[in-house]
Amino acid sequence: MPERRARRGRPVDPLARLFYDVTGEKPDDASLLRMRRVSVALNLRDNDALWSVLAVLEYYARLYEAMPERIRQAGKGNLDAVRDEAREATDALMARHRDALARCKATIELAERMTVEHEARYRATLAALNEQALVAQAGRAADRIARIAGNRVVGAVAVAAREHRQQLDAAVALFEREMSAAAARAAKVEQIAARRMTKAFRALVVGALIVILLAATAGAVAGRYSGSHTSLMSPFMNASAS
């Protein structure tokens, strides 16, 4: 009996019957018109397999057309719930937004502190680098000044040493000349002294000879005088004795 009723309820039109067999619903005139227009455009035959696909697509097209009305009807009863949910969602979203703003503010403050610290470290590092550069530059300048001063001192010492050596050479030459002159004078003095000593020795020898001669002469004279005096005194002595 149900099969007979179903057969009695099936449409007579083959296209409408195909739509009914595929979807379980009877098509309206607009659906049949669209299906025939598409079949003419695609040049479908009566036994083409695309008719079933066309019926399914038409069914979904009818569902999509009826969907806004169904959504509107379903939304009428749940509008308050939707408003409450929307309010709760808005409050939650605002809370999240406030939380995000607070985190953003904290992040910005942290970034500002990190920026200040980084700037301070950068300035300290730059100052240290500048100080190191100044120290290195001062060291290089001091080394250069020391080298220049050392070169000048060495040059001055070399010039002074050369002048001092020249003076020493001149003094040594003068000393040698003076020593030569003194030696010459000493030789002359020695020669003069030798000559004088020779003359004095000769004079002494001559004087000694003269003294010896005088002594001999005096002795001879004294001997003669004593002999003559003895001969003169002997008669007087004989007379006195007698």
Image: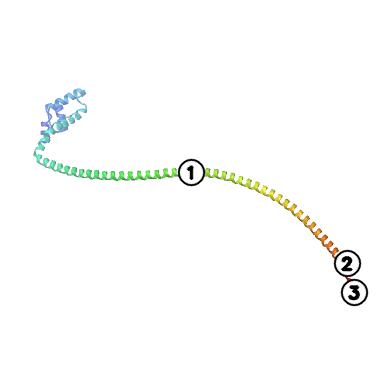
Answer yes or no: do the residues labelled 3 and 2 have beta carbons within 8 Å?
A: no
Question: Label 3's element?
Answer: helix
Number of other residues with Cα within 10 Å of mark 1, as a class: few under 14, some 14 to 19, many 20 or more: few
As drawn, 207 above or below 54: below
Q: Which mark is residue 158?
A: none
The residue nearer to you, when weighing 63 against 72, is: 72
Which mark is nearer the camera, 3 or 1? 3
Horizontal side, residue 7 vs residue 206: left or right: left
Chain-order first, disc 1 or disc 2: 1
Residue 192 locus on image (x, y percent): 73, 51
Q: At 10% from the left edge and 31% from the top edge, which residue is drawn?
A: 9
Q: Quadrant of the N terminus?
A: top left
Q: Colour scheme of this structure image? A: rainbow
Q: Which residue is mark 3?
A: 239
Q: Secondary structure at mark 1?
A: helix
Q: Residue 170: x, y in percent? A: 61, 45
